């Protein structure tokens, strides 16, 4: 039987903070910023460990990696050097004490019996601080490296649902059992130990299409969604929460933000323009757009790319939060008021920039009651 109290602690990422804060993409070279500036993120293992310990000591709730298998080209070959996310998470969790670290896993590339055992191993190493970010498909250029052709768009989520079913069956069933589905026919299933503390890892999904949102609402604890504007985001959050309640579930919503915080707003705006426009790796950004258009990403449809190409260079189209500390805090407060539980932050260089956020932004958020 699941320990409900411990599971609630997991879902809160062991934190009482109203607004959860995490950092997005440090397992990749350049992080999530497709830029040529020389100070861009290294993505090295030593820098990842230093960052994880720094965030852990500061009370940051989570780190969310990008599942990436090859670079995006361009002058920098953006994100060409990356760490496989579950192994990376295991190492960081062993080096920290409180922070939650997610693994971002492409369900079609990993058999669920292997995945169930792998995730439980990391979960025990971390004493319950591992989270699972499920990806049901997207970039066929990467899938071809595995000799795998993707399913039709909506069918990817049907497959992902069975993949999760098998994993959760192995996490909960005692003794031997069988799974007989459309995609998996698996006799003689058994797996020990179960996840840490008779609970299960948090599940996140970033589906943005109608099928993707339906999958996340039905199967995930957290839905990771784009934030185009705060006003549209508030309406989107309310609609998704209402849809989840109709299914008898509660779901929390997260989004990504790209932060540039400097002593003055002018300095911050100049730096944002410098790294995300004047020194953007446009070859890599165009490749991302091409792949997204070919393989069904809703973030690249209906002219979204042309309207937001600088945001894609700044960090995957995340919402820009740019200014002095007071401006940053006011904007984050608006995001929280729109109903989001948390934000995943992208920075050009996490180690260089986080100390200023820790000194100037976190105390202001505490005074507002968003952090405790």
Image (cartoon, rainbow, N blue to C red):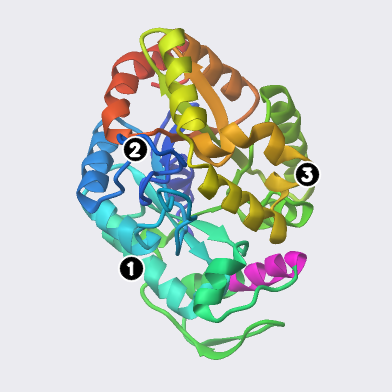
Q: Is residue 19 above or below residue 97?
A: above
The residue shown at (49%, 19%) is: 322
162 within the magenta span = yes
Q: Is residue 364 visible?
A: yes
Cβ atoms under marks 1 and 2 closer than 8 Å: no
Q: Which residues are magenta?
A: 153-163
Q: CA distance from mark 2 to mark 3?
A: 40 Å
Label number found at residue 121: 1
Q: Which mark is residue 243?
A: 3
Please provide percent x and percent y for residue 142.
Answer: 53, 68
Are there few (<14), some (14-19), or many (20+) residues within 10 Å of tag 1?
A: some
Q: Is residue 62 above or below residue 193?
A: above
Read off the residue under disc 2: 40
At x 57% / y 73%, what residue is drawn? Answer: 108
Image quarter (top left, top right, bottom left or bottom right) of the C terminus? top left
Residue 221 screen position, x and y as percent: 58, 49
The secondary structure that dominates the magenta segment is helix
Q: Of helix, strand and loop, which one carries label 1?
A: helix
Q: Earlier in the sequence, mark 1 or mark 2?
A: 2
Residue 3: % across, % down: 45, 54
Q: Which-is-in-front pick, marks 1 and 2?
A: 2
Residue 320 colored in magenta in the image: no
Residue 141, located in which quarter of the rendered image? bottom right
Q: CA distance from mark 1 to mark 2?
A: 33 Å
Instruction: From this view, report whether residue 360 is shown above or below residue 78.
Output: above
Q: Is residue 181 left or right of residue 174?
A: right
N-terminal label among 2 and 3: 2
Instruction: Tell me where residue 98 sits by quadrant.
Output: top left
Under tag 2, what secondary structure? loop
């Amino acid at each position: 039987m699941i320990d409900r109290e411990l599971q609630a602690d997991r879902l809160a990422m062991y934190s009482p903070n109203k607004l959860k804060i995490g950092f997005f993409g440090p397992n990749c070279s350049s992080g999530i910023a497709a830029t040529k500036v020389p100070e861009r993120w290294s993505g090295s293992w030593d820098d990842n460990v230093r960052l994880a310990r720094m965030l852990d000591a500061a009370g940051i709730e989570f780190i969310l990696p990008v599942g990436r298998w090859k670079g995006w080209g361009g002058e920098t070959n953006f994100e060409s050097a990356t760490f496989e996310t579950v192994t990376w998470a295991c190492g960081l969790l062993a080096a920290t004490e409180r922070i939650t670290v997610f693994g971002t896993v492409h369900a079609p590339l990993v058999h669920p019996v292997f995945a169930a055992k792998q995730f439980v191993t990391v979960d025990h190493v971390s004493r319950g601080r591992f989270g699972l970010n499920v990806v049901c498909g997207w970039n066929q250029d990467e899938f071809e490296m595995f000799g795998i052709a993707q399913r039709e768009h909506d069918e990817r989520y049907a497959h992902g649902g069975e993949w999760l079913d098998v994993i959760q069956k192995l996490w909960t069933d005692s003794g031997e059992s069988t799974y007989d589905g459309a995609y998996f026919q698996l006799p003689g299933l058994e797996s020990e130990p179960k996840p840490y503390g008779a609970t299960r890892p948090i599940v996140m999904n970033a589906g943005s299409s109608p099928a993707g949102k339906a999958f996340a609402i039905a199967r995930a604890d957290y839905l990771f969604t784009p934030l185009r504007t705060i006003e549209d985001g508030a309406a989107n959050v309310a609609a998704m929460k209402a849809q989840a309640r109709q299914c008898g579930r509660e779901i929390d919503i997260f989004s990504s933000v790209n932060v540039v915080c400097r002593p003055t707003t002018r300095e911050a705006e100049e730096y944002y323009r410098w790294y995300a426009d004047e020194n953007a790796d446009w070859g890599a950004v165009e490749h991302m757009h091409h792949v997204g258009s070919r393989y069904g990403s809703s973030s690249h449809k209906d002219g979204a790319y042309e309207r937001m190409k600088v945001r894609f260079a700044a960090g995957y189209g995340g919402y820009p939060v740019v200014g002095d500390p007071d401006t940053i805090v006011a904007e984050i407060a608006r995001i929280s008021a729109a109903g989001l539980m948390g934000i995943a932050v992208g920075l050009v260089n996490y180690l260089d920039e986080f100390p200023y956020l820790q000194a100037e932004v976190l105390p202001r958020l505490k005074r507002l009651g968003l952090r405790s």
